[in-house]
Amino acid sequence: MKTEKLYHNDSYQITFQASIVEKYKDRERYALILNQTCFYPTSGGQINDRGVIEGLTVLAVEEENGKLIHYLQDEIKAAIGDTVTGRIDWQYRFDHMQQHTGQHILSGALMKLWQKDTQSFHMGEDICTLDIAAMVLDEQKVTELERLANQIIYEDRVIELYFVKNSAQLKEKSTLRIKNEQLEELRIIEIERFDKSACGGTHCHRTGEVGLIKIIGWENRKDKIRLSFLCGYRALTDYQQKHHIVKKLSHYFTTGVDQLEEKIIQLNEEQKELTKLYNKMEKRIIEGESEELKDKNRRKEKVFFLIEKLFMEQKIQNIRQIAQLLAKDEKTITILGAEKPEPVLCLTLSSDLNYPIKEIFNQVMFEFGGKGGGAKHFVLGKLEREEDVKQAYQRAIQLILSLEK
């Protein structure tokens, strides 16, 4: 026995009564099959309705061999044959009606403008997408597409649904957009003087109810283009959020909304110049720091020179660059550390020496719970606790000095 789909005849029906045909437990989920339902299942790119049956939340709705399976949060008390009452979440349903109807309008506009058929449609919880065959798409064409789609909305055209039940009728409907539909019976969604397509989803009665269609992005995917769009309240919410951000930015930069883009571009260019200047200055500071370490912290051991310093505060990238500069000297081992902003330890070995500093580093990291790595002549890592840096630093010096014994 197939489930009668009440939403096929009336997408605006919110409550319904039905008799229980089957009830069972399916992999920790409580399944319920009714003789009729208003709940739309996940199908055709549209996600299932939300709502309750006898007060129990409907978690998911799926279709299997003509039967609609409602998965409930708990086992229903009513028995097979009993009558139950269901209620869909209207706000959630209407959102789906706006998105799906909007997709039909957008698909019709794509066909009217560039003869591009819709290959697939997906309705997400936040964003909808549709795929079309590859084409050259730019801001101007997207604006043209949005204008036509929204013109159809503003004209508040009638949307009619009906069923085509035989092949002869199908041939008469030569303007239909049909993709792999069965020929026994098709449910047709027809937008007055604009678009006809076969679809089993829930839709509005008039295009005006869609409110607004906004394309928020597109991307090339091999042989197709994926459009991302919002309709109705989703599009309104998106506009409200973005308008709020633009107003805040306009106030922050003390400029009008119409000059905001120019202001941000100007500040971005200034930032680039400042970054270049900062990098040059930091490079000089790092070079100066390394020269000072050579002068003040370099001492001769039996076989090699040792340069070591524990910084109270030094960025990890600066530690790396200073150590790399010091490693260029002959017969030199360097031990550098920093307590802040991150607890860091770094060991380097000049290329003319052959000591196992990586093994020493790994031993210190193991003893003090640090993590890091590197190559034969350069290793760097972070410790978990700032208070361990001094001891780890001293331990590294101890192990390095033991190499000469």
Image: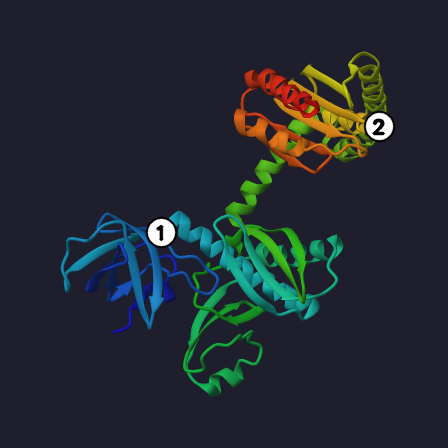
Is the residue marked by circle 1 packed among few (<14), some (14-19), or many (20+) residues within 10 Å? many
Q: Position of residue 150 (x, y in %)?
A: 61, 55
Out of 345 and 14, give the one closest to the viewer. Answer: 345
Residue at label 2? 330
Q: Type of residue at label 1?
A: Arg
Residue located farthest toward the top when viewing the structure as drawn: 296
Residue located farthest toward the bottom when viewing the structure as drawn: 168
The first of marks 1 and 2 along the sequence is: 1
x 39%, y 60%: residue: 11
Mark number displayed over residue 50? 1
x 55%, y 60%: residue: 103
The C terminus sits in image quarter:
top right
Cα gap from disc 1 to disc 2, whole angstroms? 72 Å
**Left of 36 or right of it: where is 346?**
right
Q: Position of residue 33 (x, y in %)?
A: 25, 64
Q: Type of residue at label 2?
A: Glu
Q: Is residue 340 visible?
A: no
- Residue 328, by quadrant, is top right
**In the structure shown, which secondary structural element does the residue marked by tag 2 occupy?**
loop
**Left of 391 or right of it: where is 13?**
left
Q: How is the image coloured?
A: rainbow
Out of 242 and 102, give the one closest to the viewer. Answer: 242
**In the structure shown, which secondary structural element does the residue marked by tag 1 occupy?**
loop
